[in-house]
Amino acid sequence: MMKKRFNPIKDRSSEIVAFLMASPDMPKDEDVRFKIELSIEEAVENVVRYAYEGGIGWLEAGTSLDDKSLLLTIELRDAGMPFNPLEMDDPDVTLGANERPVGGLGIYLCKQMMDNIEYHYKDGNNILTMKKLVNPEKV
């Protein structure tokens, strides 16, 4: 797994996203890359905004690619406040933006764009794992 720890994370969302997107594990297919990047942006922004008081804390971000099944795994780990974004109700996307309560749309988009998302809280760490099957002919 290629990974890096960012500390502090305040105002570093774009740097963290760029690091992950530059991974040699990322597929070349632009449509798939767009979905992955959008999901990473949403997940990283949630950690940067909400995990730590004032954004002072660390985030470890990494990628890996299973060569056999071509399953891309993106893992985000932080020691911020425990929070499982998957427990949030999906927003009612049939309502207009002004009719919906604020929040929840980002993780909803992640669920739509990725093939699998899991959350664990272990040893004082939030661990968000997002997985995407990539097309072997376009890697």
Image (cartoon, grey):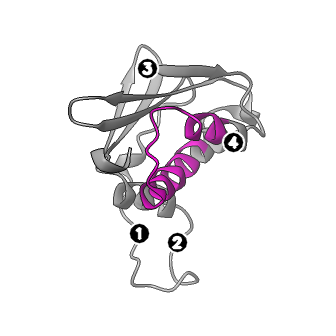
- Amino acid type at image mark 2: Pro
How crowded is the residue under tag 4: few (<14 C-alpha within 10 Å), some, or many (20+)?
Answer: many
How crowded is the residue under tag 3: few (<14 C-alpha within 10 Å), some, or many (20+)?
Answer: few
- SS class, disc 3: loop
- Dot 4 or dot 3: first in sequence order is 3
Q: Which mark is residue 1?
A: 3
Whole-percent x, y for residue 138 in the image: 36, 50
Q: Which residue is mark 4?
A: 13
Q: Which residue is mark 2?
A: 101
Q: Is 27 a magenta residue? A: yes
Nearer to us: label 3 or label 1? 3
Nearer to us: label 2 or label 1? 1
The Cα–Cα distance between marks 3 and 1, rounded to whole angstroms, is: 33 Å
- SS class, disc 2: loop
The quadrant in which residue 112 appears is bottom left
- Amino acid type at image mark 4: Ser
